[in-house]
Structures are given as C-alpha cells and as structure tokens.
Amino acid sequence: MGGIGVDHAFLALERELAVFLRRARASSGELAREVHPELESAAYGLLMRLEDAGEQRATDLAAYFGVGKATMSRQLRALEDLGLVARAPDPADGRAFLVQLTDEGRARFRRVRGARRTRYARRLAAWERSEVAELARLLHRLNSVQLTDEPGQGARPPQE
C-alpha cells in the first residue's frame, strides 16, 4: 500500500466488516430483548462471556471487552437489577467481587443462545462444516488483533 495505489483486498475487507458489524449490532439488540425486554444490546455478549468462562471480576470483564470500569459497572448493575447476574465476594480477595449468572439469567440466556445457533445452522446449511470452522478460526484470529494499534504494538486477548 504505502500511499501508492489502492489495495482492493483491504477495501473489500473494510466494506464486508462494516456490513457485518452493522448486522451484528442489530442482531445483538434483538437477542438481548429476547433474553429480557429491558436488556441493552451490549449485554448479550457479557452474558455469553459469563456463561462460557464462568464467574469473573468486573475488572477482568472490562479488560476482556476493552471497556472502562465505569461502563462495565453500569452494565453489570443493570443486569443485576434485572436478576440476570449476581455479585459475590471473591474468596481470594475480600475487597473484590465475582460476577456470575443467576439461575434465571442462565436459563434465559441458554434458551436464546440455542435459538440463535439454530438460526446460524439454517442460514449456513449450504456451507461445508470445514468452512464454518475456518470462518470461526479466522474471526478468532482477527479478534486477537487490536485493529487500532500501530504495527508492533501488543494485541488484545482473544474474543469471541
């Protein structure tokens, strides 16, 4: 690239990511409302992380998603108010709390996630299973890179 010419591969990537992200935001809002009518769209990914990784400190969740502590605190408070997550003292550090899904939160999330996976399977029915696996692998690799970093700087932890 270097300022000379146009790299069509990166233009195509930018275009496809823009469409993908726009659709993902809309889908996250729908999924969040399926879990609970008052749930913010960003909270669906938070519930997914707690389901997949188990209880965690709010600071670890904030670091994983690349958001500030205040943002994470606000999101967790909203989830707690809806009865979807609970905080308990961290046995390793009495000053800290661990966040976990409540039974209600887990049941609601699993119901919606199951329906989402069914929709994915239906939409990608014409794809080879190896293609689905390759897409997941490539997205994981992309999510492992901090796209706003300058070359040579560190990467973010892998995200889903």
Image (cartoon, grey):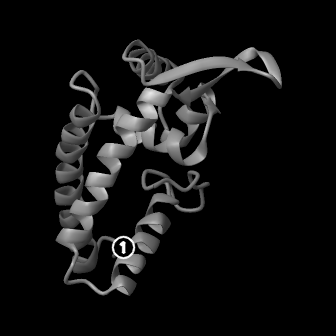
Question: Disc 1 residue type?
Answer: Gly
Task: Check the image and name the residue furthest to the right.
Answer: 92
Residue 64, relative to residue 123: is it above or below? above
| Residue 78 coordinates in the image, percent (x, y) | 38, 16
Q: State the quadrant of the N terminus.
A: bottom left
Residue 130, image quadrant = bottom left
Q: Is residue 130 left or right of residue 15?
A: right
Residue 82, relative to residue 109: is it above or below? above
At a point 30% along the width and 45% down the height, the residue shown is 112
Instruction: In this rendered view, identify the residue nearer to me: 132 or 37.
Output: 37
At a point 37% along the width and 39% down the height, the residue shown is 109
Q: Is residue 64 left or right of residue 117?
A: right
Element carrying mark 1: loop
| Residue 4 coordinates in the image, percent (x, y) | 27, 77
Is residue 65 in sight in this rendering? Answer: yes
Question: What residue sits right under mark 1 in the picture?
Answer: 2
Q: State the quadrant of the C terminus.
A: bottom left
Instruction: In this rendered view, identify the residue nearer to me: 65 or 112.
Output: 112
Is residue 11 in sight in this rendering? Answer: no
At a point 26% along the width and 79% down the height, the residue shown is 9
Residue 99, image quadrant = top right
| Residue 36 coordinates in the image, percent (x, y) | 27, 27
